[in-house]
Amino acid sequence: MPSAHEITQLLQAWSAGDNQALEKLTPLVYQELHRTARRYMALERPDHTLQATALIDEVYLRLVDCDSVSWQDRNHFFAVCARLMRRILTDFARSRQYLKRGGAVRKITFDENLFVTSEPRADLVALDHALEGLSKVDKRKSDVVELRFFGGLGVKDTASVLGVSDETVKRDWRLAKLWLLREMGAENRDGA
């Protein structure tokens, strides 16, 4: 298991233009990225055409095109990757029109237990829409959701990435869940 310091050094070298650093970094972060991708894919339909490996490949393609990122540390890297995975899957769902109004959309509860369920279920587009709304109201709370729910980061790592206290993350997490549940419930009632 590579150290966080080793990963941070490679990320900073890559930011400085060292393309060999990316080649060294890739095998060091692959397992963690694959775990995150599997969490995402567990929320998708069982017959989804994307697989975890393809999702990681798409993330790498987008990362290679990102020249302007100044990586802070390991947590920042994984947070950006988690955000990219969410965007890729949301874009994929929208482009394929998997979730149409009035269709067979399954409702989800916004709960940490979604990580451990083997039952694939999610309305990723509705959650994405609600997260966009939360981001307009309170960007930090939206970031907490992305890092914890999608990125799989714990309270301490999330606090480190955002530069806030553990208690602030816990409070933001509770309030964000309530806000998202309310918004997603309003969407379901309105037929969106």
Image: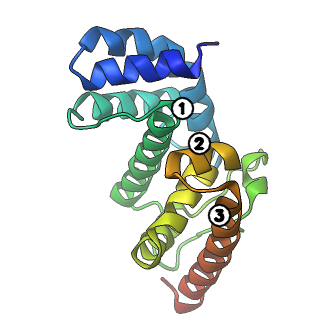
Left or right: 153 in relation to 117: left
Q: Nearer the viewer, mark 3 or mark 1?
A: 3
Q: Which mark is residue 41?
A: 2
Disc 3 from disc 2: Cα separation = 29 Å
Q: Nearer the viewer, residue 45 or 112?
A: 112
| Residue 128 vertical placement versus 68 (above, below) | below
Count residues near mark 3 (Cα–Cα under 10 Å), then give few for <14, some for 14-19, many for 20+: some
Residue that appears at 78% across and 45% down? 116
Residue marked by disc 1: 52
Residue marked by disc 3: 168
Residue that appears at 58% across and 78% down? 184
Q: Nearer the viewer, residue 103 or 168?
A: 168
Disc 1 from disc 2: Cα separation = 6 Å
Count residues near mark 2 (Cα–Cα under 10 Å), then give few for <14, some for 14-19, many for 20+: many
Q: Nearer the viewer, mark 3 or mark 2?
A: 3
Left or right: 165 in relation to 52: right
